[in-house]
Image (cartoon, rainbow, N blue to C red):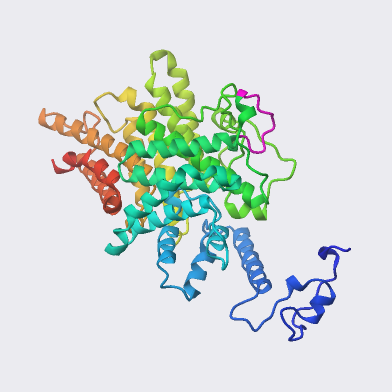
């Protein structure tokens, strides 16, 4: 029997009116490919042709070298479907729409269109793991809603999700990724709410799933020798390259969560990148999800020592394949800088200089905020987070050298100044909902600027000229602190964490 790929192409537009498939398609055993032009919207072929035309035009723009840096919107199809949907009064869809607008900020790593197709397809049944994830999505939708009646349901969605979590994994091995996704969103929800202990709990739960499923070893060039291999929880093979991509992106999302919040909580990260402990990281850097379909990894592609190669500098920065990859790299540098600074002594000066150089090379490779499409607020917020995280890596590394005096030439102040300067490239209004960890970072930046203000005012009170003593300009410092507080105030109504961080430097602003 011949495969469909060997059949001759059918001449579109010549179909008879017979349904559900025309005679021509039935004779060629290709009934599933039959399309009609009299439907309520464009056919799949028409959509593909339009996409080809768009991509050809984009290639021409890029070849001319004048186009801004524009990234693929993974939510575009969902937004379009919602605009034409007839079920706008469905409260569950309304909650999902609210979540989708801010999915990236809560660590959503699944392919949004495929996921929502599965959720809302007529007649589809939901596994327990999928229902748990949906309840978590409804929770975030309710939290971000402007409707007080919907906001009042937040606790009930949280209770429902938490009650079913313990029973999720045994039922559906493939659904472990849904449970891990739910744990990531819950961790960010609790961190954002200022409930750090619960955030750590759900972070650890996500890490446990990632480790048990060996997501740190996807496409590894080496076989794991961990003693835990015999009891490792194994996922079924991915059904396609996109599902493999979801697992890769899921791993790096959990990795970032683990590395960043380990710093905030003063604990050690779980992903120690140790072969003896079974936490070695060979999984390749994440791509944008669309790239797993359009430019998948070759079948024989293998990866090894991903994090170690980056730290050593053998893995360059200029060709980072996605914003998520840049985020992961910034998190590596941030946590590494904090760890090295915590045990700083004169004998570690060489290590400090080496890491300092690595951080500076990384920052130089980052695209400026102004280069991104201003209509893609999700990308703008992600880019702002990466820039701020990399500047805070410098602050963390050099804090032991600053002591109690911040000057204009202090590396900590220069990094804080650069972090605030990045805010100028972003419309403050799009920061109403941000990744919770940027609250921690902005708190760090605010403390450095507050220290600079304290230094300047101390010198002024002593009758010494601040500029003569190398202190930053007081008016500049005050303007920077006000700009930072203005950005934080945007998200404070939805974030007790951000409110608490603002309080750490509010007295300096009021002085």
Question: Which residue sits at x=16%, y=31%?
Answer: 465
Question: Which residue sits at x=32%, y=62%?
Answer: 150
Q: Residue furthest top?
A: 347
Q: Is 333 situated above or below 299?
A: above
Q: In terms of secondary structure, what is the magenta stretch mainly?
A: loop
Q: Nearer the viewer, residue 393 or 354?
A: 393
Query: In this image, 109 relative to 217: left or right?
Result: left
For the N terminus, give its image quadrant.
bottom right
Q: Residue furthest bottom?
A: 17
Q: Is 203 situated above or below 100?
A: above
The image shows residue 89 at horizontal and vertical percentages of 41, 73
Q: Quadrant of residue 441?
A: top left
For the record, the magenta segment spans 217-227
Q: Nearer the viewer, residue 372 or 506?
A: 506
Counting every numbered tag in the picture gives 0
Q: Nearer the viewer, residue 32 or 418?
A: 32
Would you say residue 416 is visible in this rendering?
no
């Amino acid at each position: 029997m011949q495969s469909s790929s060997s059949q001759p192409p059918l001449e579109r537009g010549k179909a008879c009116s017979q349904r559900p498939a025309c005679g021509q398609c039935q004779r060629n055993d290709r009934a599933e490919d039959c399309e009609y032009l009299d439907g309520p919207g464009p056919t799949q072929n028409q959509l593909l042709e339009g996409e080809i035309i768009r991509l050809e035009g984009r290639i021409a723009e890029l070849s001319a070298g004048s186009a801004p840096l524009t990234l693929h919107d993974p939510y575009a199809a969902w937004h379009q479907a919602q605009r034409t949907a007839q079920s706008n009064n469905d409260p569950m869809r309304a909650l999902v729409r609210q979540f989708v607008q801010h999915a990236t900020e809560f660590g959503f790593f699944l392919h949004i269109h495929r996921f929502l197709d599965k959720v809302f397809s007529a007649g589809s049944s939901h596994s327990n793991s999928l229902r748990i994830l949906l309840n978590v999505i409804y929770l975030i939708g309710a939290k971000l809603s402007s409707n007080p009646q919907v906001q009042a349901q937040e606790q009930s969605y949280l209770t429902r999700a938490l009650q079913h979590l313990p029973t999720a994994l045994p039922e559906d091995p493939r659904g472990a990724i849904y449970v891990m996704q739910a744990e990531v969103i819950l961790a960010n929800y609790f961190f954002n709410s200022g409930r750090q202990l619960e955030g750590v709990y759900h972070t650890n739960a996500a890490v446990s799933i990632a480790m048990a499923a060996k997501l740190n070893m996807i496409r590894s060039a080496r076989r794991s020798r961990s003693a835990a291999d015999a009891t490792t929880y194994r996922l079924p093979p991915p059904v396609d390259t996109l599902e493999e991509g979801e697992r890769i992106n899921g791993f790096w999302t959990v990795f970032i969560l683990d590395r960043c919040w380990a710093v905030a909580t003063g604990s050690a990260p779980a992903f120690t990148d140790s072969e003896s402990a079974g936490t070695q990281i060979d999984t390749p850097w994440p791509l944008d999800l669309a790239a797993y379909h359009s430019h998948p990894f070759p079948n024989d592609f293998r990866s090894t020592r991903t994090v170690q190669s980056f730290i050593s500098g053998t893995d360059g920065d200029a060709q980072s394949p996605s914003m998520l990859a840049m985020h992961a790299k910034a998190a590596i540098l941030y946590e590494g800088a904090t760890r090295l600074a915590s045990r700083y002594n004169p004998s570690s000066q060489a290590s400090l200089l080496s890491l300092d150089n690595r951080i500076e090379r990384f920052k130089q490779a980052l695209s400026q905020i102004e280069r991104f499409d201003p209509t893609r607020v999700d990308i703008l917020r992600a880019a702002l987070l990466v820039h701020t995280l990399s500047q805070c890596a410098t602050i963390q590394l050099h804090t032991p050298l600053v002591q109690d005096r911040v000057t204009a030439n202090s590396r900590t102040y220069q990094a804080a100044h650069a972090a605030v300067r990045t805010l100028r490239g972003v419309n403050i209004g799009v920061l109403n909902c941000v990744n919770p960890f940027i609250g921690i970072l902005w708190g760090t930046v605010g403390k450095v600027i507050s220290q600079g203000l304290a230094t300047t005012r101390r010198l002024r009170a002593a009758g010494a000229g601040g500029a003569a003593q190398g202190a930053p300009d007081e008016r500049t410092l005050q303007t920077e602190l006000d700009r930072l507080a203005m950005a934080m105030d945007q998200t404070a109504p939805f974030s007790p964490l951000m409110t608490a961080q603002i309080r750490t430097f509010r007295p300096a602003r009021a002085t």
